[in-house]
Amino acid sequence: MSPMPELSRRSLLGGAAAAAVLSALPISIQQALAAPARPGRLADIQHVVVFMQATPTPTATT
């Protein structure tokens, strides 16, 4: 029987943080993340959405 890998504090906290974040997501997002990836082709892409948000310029105070 192979030895059990050592569990570090970093990996334990990282796993707990990931579980907390995933449990806070809406059910629809959790289901989408749990669904297996379907292979496809580049030609199968119908839409591409690019979202850009500019950082507002800080106002100068005098």
Image (cartoon, rainbow, N blue to C red):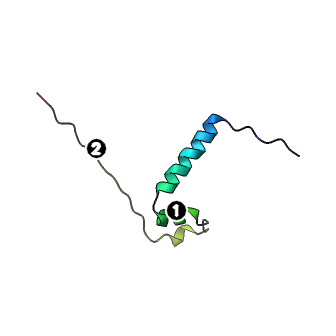
Seen in the picture, residue 12 relative to 19 is either above or below; the reply is above
Seen in the picture, residue 29 relative to 44 is either above or below; the reply is above
Please name the amino acid that badge 2 sits on.
Thr
Q: Secondary structure at mark 1?
A: helix
x, y (%) of residue 60?
A: 15, 32
Separation of residues labelled 2 and 1 (CA atoms): 30 Å
- Tell which residue pokes out farthest to the right in this image: 1
- Give the labeled residue for mark 1: 30
Where, by quadrant of the figure, is residue 2 drawn?
A: top right
- Tell which residue pokes out farthest to the left in this image: 62
Judging depth in this view, the residue of 5 and 49 nearest the camera is: 5
Q: Residue at x 70, y 38 (%)?
A: 7
x, y (%) of residue 11?
A: 63, 40
Left or right of 34, for residue 49: left
Image quadrant in which the C terminus is located: top left
Q: Badge 1 local density, few (<14 within 10 Å), some, or many (20+)? A: few
Q: Residue at x 48, y 65 (%)?
A: 27
- Give the labeled residue for mark 2: 55
Q: Residue at x 76, y 40 (%)?
A: 5
x, y (%) of residue 52?
A: 34, 53
Please name the amino acid that badge 1 sits on.
Gln
Q: Residue at x 46, y 58 (%)?
A: 25
Q: Name which of mark 2 and mark 1 comes first in the sequence.
A: 1
Circles 2 and 1 in contact, beta carbons < 8 Å:
no
Q: Badge 2 local density, few (<14 within 10 Å), some, or many (20+)? A: few
x, y (%) of residue 57?
A: 22, 39
Seen in the picture, residue 52 relative to 40 is either above or below; the reply is above
Q: Secondary structure at mark 2?
A: loop
* Disc number lying in front (2 or 1): 1
Q: Which mark is residue 54?
A: none
Left or right of 61, for residue 22: right
Seen in the picture, residue 35 relative to 17 is either above or below; the reply is below
